[in-house]
Image: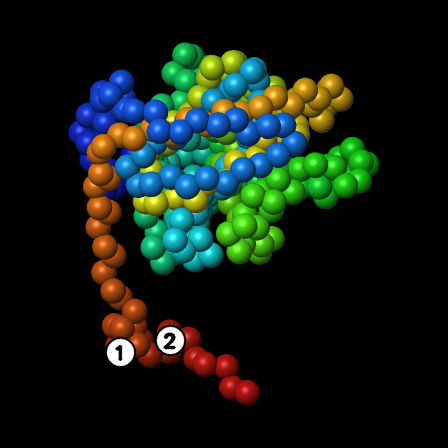
Amino acid sequence: MTSPHFDEGFYTALIAARSQFDLSDKFVVHPESGRSFSIRKGQTFRIIEAEGPQIGDVWFYNQFDPKKEHFWSNYTMVLEGVHMKKLSRLWSTMPKFRPMATVLEETVSSRGSPPHNIALGSFCTTESWELFTGMKGHNSCYMNGLQAIEPFGLSEYDLHDNLNVHMNVKIDGDTGDVSVEKTQCEKGDYIEFYAEIDLLVVLSVCPEGDGSSLRSGEITVRPLEVEVYDTYVEPKPFPEWSDWRPSLRQGFYPEDSNSRATTPQK
Ligand SMILES: [Zn+2]
């Protein structure tokens, strides 16, 4: 299912032109660390399994207004489903509420495995490591993310919804229970995002390794690689929302004045 305002022909042509994209940048994010990087609108970036199975956490921000616009995982799941697959779009918070990035490819489900890359919007914290393992002060995606956003004047209050890449998460359709299983991603698997707006991206190499480590007790944390590509294709502008707020001030509910919220009296 694709959400409204989706021009499938535009993305079909873009995907068909992938072999003509030019590699612009390439770097490795090492175990026990995070990194932030800027992506111009119209560029793509891939998050690649550099040496083998490894899950990662990714945060997306408006590069020029990161405090006010970032990825909105809950609404993205309502519109796109819980797993980000080819042509899934990642939506931003109100009031902009627009696609920030579109998935052009993710290889794990393309080759027949269940979809990974879940938008549940959770990440391991040093607190969750202490909760589940008793280990104190453990490296976490939260710690990695904080270190990566600090240079941009952002803090703990700005580390919001994220996408879990390469992560094999199952949701029981009857009970709603969530379970994390070992990733089925292999060396070379990747997910590729097309930037619909100028992005600040934060990537953490999760200290849970392949996603099974908390149960198995055997933790191997491997690096993730990022490749950035120039596509030379400008994103299509998303339609501007109508400006409804002035009409609310002028009486949005003219026949039902009791439904208007009242200003609390001091
Ligand atoms: Zn983590």
Q: Where, quadrant-wise, is the C terminus in this rendering? A: bottom right
Question: From the viewer's perspective, is residue 255 above or below residue 240?
Answer: below
Scheme of colours in the image: rainbow
Of the pair 76 and 53, the residue shown nearer to us: 53
Q: Which residue is mark 2?
A: 260
Q: Residue at x 44, y 53 (%)?
A: 66
Of the pair 245 and 164, the residue shown nearer to us: 164
Looking at marks 2 and 1 on the same chain, the residue that comes earlier in the sequence is marked by 1
Q: Which residue is mark 1?
A: 250
Q: Secondary structure at mark 2?
A: loop
Report the number of discs: 2
Residue 247, percent from left and from top: 25, 72
Q: Quadrant of residue 65?
A: bottom left
Which amino acid type corresponds to the residue marked 1 in the rendered image? Answer: Gln
Question: From the viewer's perspective, is residue 255 above or below residue 85?
Answer: below
Q: Is residue 106 visible?
A: yes
Q: Where, quadrant-wise, is the N terminus in this rendering? A: top left
Which amino acid type corresponds to the residue marked 2 in the rendered image? Answer: Arg
Residue 134, percent from left and from top: 81, 36
Of the pair 62 and 79, the residue shown nearer to us: 62
Neighbour tally class for label 2: few under 14, some 14-19, many 20 plus, Cα within 10 Å:
few
Q: Secondary structure at mark 1?
A: loop
Relative to residue 151, is residue 241 drawn left or right?
left
Q: Residue at x 43, y 44 (%)?
A: 200
| Number of the label disc, if any, that sits on residue 18 | none
Residue 73, percent from left and from top: 46, 43
Residue 183, percent from left and from top: 56, 20
